[in-house]
Amino acid sequence: MSRSTFTCNECGAAHKKWAGRCEACGAWNSIVEEAALSTGPSKKTLGAAKGRRVDLTSLSAKDTPLARAVSGMDEFDRVLGGGLVPASAILVGGDPGIGKSTLLLQAAASFARKGLKSIYVSGEEAAAQIRMRADRLGLSDAPVMLAAETNLRDILTTLDAERPDFVIIDSIQTMWADNVDSAPGSVSQVRSAAHELTAFAKRRGVSVVLVGHVTKDGQIAGPRVIEHMVDTVLYFEGERGHQFRILRAVKNRFGPADEIGVFEMTGGGLAEVSNPSALFLSERGQTASGSVVFAGIEGTRPVLVEIQALVAQSPLATPRRTVVGWDSGRLAMVLAVLEARCGLSFAGMDVYLNIAGGMRISEPAADLAVAAALISARQDHALPADTVVFGEISLSGALRPIAQAEARLKEAAKLGFATALAPASIKSAATGDFQVKKLSDLGQFIVEVFGDIRA
Ligand code: TYD
Ligand code: MG
């Protein structure tokens, strides 16, 4: 007997009955009825039946190192952890229209030119449309094979026969498995298609990329269910008005997570940006108050970004706290420390914080740069244009040491900055003309940069 289950299309939570609102994630109208994949656990436990004995090995067994394939698109290879691992399943998520198809068509072409047999399966566009795009990107000569198809059974049969090295499924939401009784894009279809395709990747030693659209709250439909199945999860991010695109590894079984690749969307497709700091700072105009350059680390690479703050008298009873590109909880903490430890109150003021260029920062090392931007905006006092700032702020107002200070300072010096404001506990010293001002707490930092402003 097959019973129906009710699944939330946003978060994948299972419910016993239909409801207008998912209790797990709070989304409205997201719960759909689906035929259950299995008919439930059998009465007999697995342990009761006789299974096959599995070989056990030791941790010290020597395996040959992973033979990675490199595409030659350095930004893409780096995010993968140094190239494509055979038999791996990779999920590439992102907003519709951000450039996923463009990126992966370019990657497929690069791998194909390196001799990997590459197949691009599109469930969204006709073959003629993809050819037109390839033509515009100057990739027509690359030996990529195309299929416009959504039937998973037919796709798997084809892939089994063709034995490719690299397959792109664009997108997982358009795939349709005929053994699952629900519409394409639903959680059970997405889950089942992802399962079949990752199993195929492992069985045949093929690297498979699954493209997944992200819903407006930043999750791929049926997200949790795919993320744990695949080896690598990459997100392609960026803002519509901006040409920058960031490919970020949020999970990688074969490399560091948090690694980023930076691209620029141009008329001729995605161009790699090998020096992201220069790009992120390129839009910085004359130094105004509220603008501070943060020397950050993304993955293994130092990246300088501009943090912008605006502070204004608020007409509201509860002033606004608006953050783009950073954590709002972290902003609340920095504001609280400024008030409690340094006597700088932001009560009655609206606070806006923005990371320029569409970057998203998650490092605590940005605390000090954010604090500097907030004070600079509040006091209308600009920092010197040639200064970078980094450091984590503790609740006591002390500046805590952060990782990879050396790399941050080097990058700042390379880009023409002359001074860094950093926690006292970092080891690196000044080199050449580059000056490192080491500070032990937020109060000392404020006096150093803004003078005595306690009022
Ligand atoms: P696309 O790769 O189709 O996005 P996704 O697959 O993530 O939905 O990219 C679509 C956008 O990219 C579209 O708005 C136009 C832009 N674009 C360029 O600016 N230059 C190009 O060379 C290409 C191919 C696309
Ligand atoms: Mg697309």
Image (cartoon, helix red, strand yellow):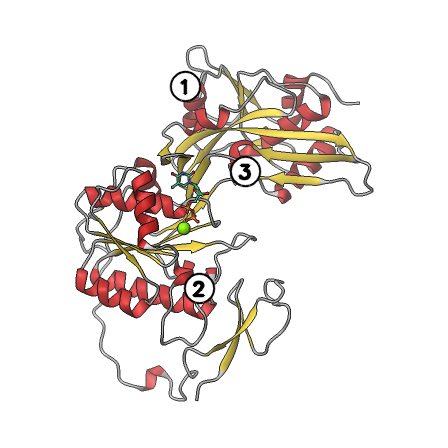
Determine contact: label 1, label 3, CB under 8 Å: no
What mark, if any, has residue 225 been given in the picture? 2
Determine contact: label 3, label 2, CB under 8 Å: no
Q: Secondary structure at mark 2?
A: helix
| Closer to viewer: mark 2 or mark 1 | 2
Q: Disc 1 to disc 3, how far (Cα)?
A: 23 Å
Residue 70 found in image quarter:
top left
Label 1 or label 3, whichever comes before in sequence order: 3
Callout 2: 10 Å neighbours few (<14), some, many (20+)?
A: many
Task: Please provide percent x and percent y for residue 179.
Answer: 36, 76
Residue at left offset 58%, top offset 30%: 307
Which residue type does callout 2 highlight? Val
Q: Quadrant of the C terminus?
A: top right
Which residue type does callout 3 highlight? Pro
In the depicted structure, whether residue 448 falls above or below residue 298? above
| Closer to viewer: mark 1 or mark 3 | 1
Which residue type does callout 1 highlight? Lys
Q: Disc 2 to disc 1, how far (Cα)?
A: 43 Å
The mark total stands at: 3
Describe residue 166's horizontal placement relative to residue 250 as left or right: left
Q: What residue did someone put label 1 on? A: 414
In the depicted structure, whether residue 195 falls above or below residue 122? below
Q: Secondary structure at mark 3?
A: helix
Determine contact: label 2, label 1, CB under 8 Å: no
Residue at left offset 28%, top offset 37%: 138
What mark, if any, has residue 364 been given in the picture? 3
Callout 1: 10 Å neighbours few (<14), some, many (20+)?
A: few
